[in-house]
Image (cartoon, grey):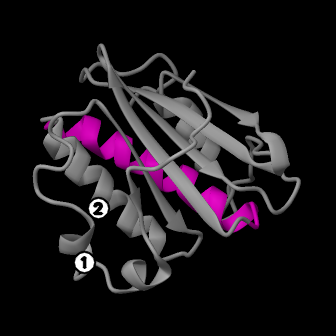
Amino acid sequence: MLPIIEEADIELTAHQVENWPDAKATVMSPEHWRAGKQTAFSLPALERSVPVCRALARAWLDGQRIQGDDTRYLILLTLSELVTNAIQHSGALRITCRLRRSAGQVHIEVHDGGGTPWVTRRRYPDHGQESGRGLELVAKSCLQWGRRTETGDGCTVWATVPLSTCAPVGRLPQP
């Protein structure tokens, strides 16, 4: 598990998020993430931040030369689910995302600054329900996932995605 996120490489304002992708050039250079195996970015807890998180993650994946479509899809899907949950349920004003590459894996963390005493829980919705499947999807698609509460009612939810094309242990077999 990674230590608590204290500082982000990139901090976006609400104005930058609302003006994305025009603001992209002011946020990062094309070579921004080529050297580091880890990055963190902080964004306002706005619905519009979800696609911006995905764009930043794609740029980091490009810099890391992680090219497999299945792997990229799973990383972006996991990040989207965790960011969406943090925005919808935490009451935080900002969220911070961290991506770290290690041997054969990418670790994803999403931290909210608190605001409400919520704790992320995996739910098992009925087939007729339109929401509530995000963490179930993460749990079944990733090698592992978890959560930890932070001081000040903050919460960090994390997941580990394999870099190989083999299906992770928790993944459901395809019909």
Residue at x-position 62% and y-position 48%: 111
Residue at x-position 61% and y-position 64%: 94
Q: Which residues are magenta?
A: 67-91
In contact (CB < 8 Å): disc 1 and disc 2: yes
* Image spot of residue 75 (x, y percent): 36, 41
Q: Image quadrant of residue 140?
A: top right
Is 126 placed left or right of 116 in the picture? Answer: left
**Residue 81 painted magenta:** yes
Q: Which mark is residue 126?
A: none
Tell me the residue that label 2 is attached to.
55
Amino acid type at circle 2 is: Ala
**As drawn, 18 above or below 137:** below
**As drawn, 106 above or below 126:** above
> Can residue 55 be seen at all in this image of the molecule?
yes
* Image spot of residue 43 (x, y percent): 49, 65
Question: Mark 1 vs mark 2: which is more N-terminal?
Answer: 1
> Can residue 133 be seen at all in this image of the molecule?
no
Depth check: give the residue in front, 129 or 104. Answer: 104
Q: Which mark is residue 21?
A: 1
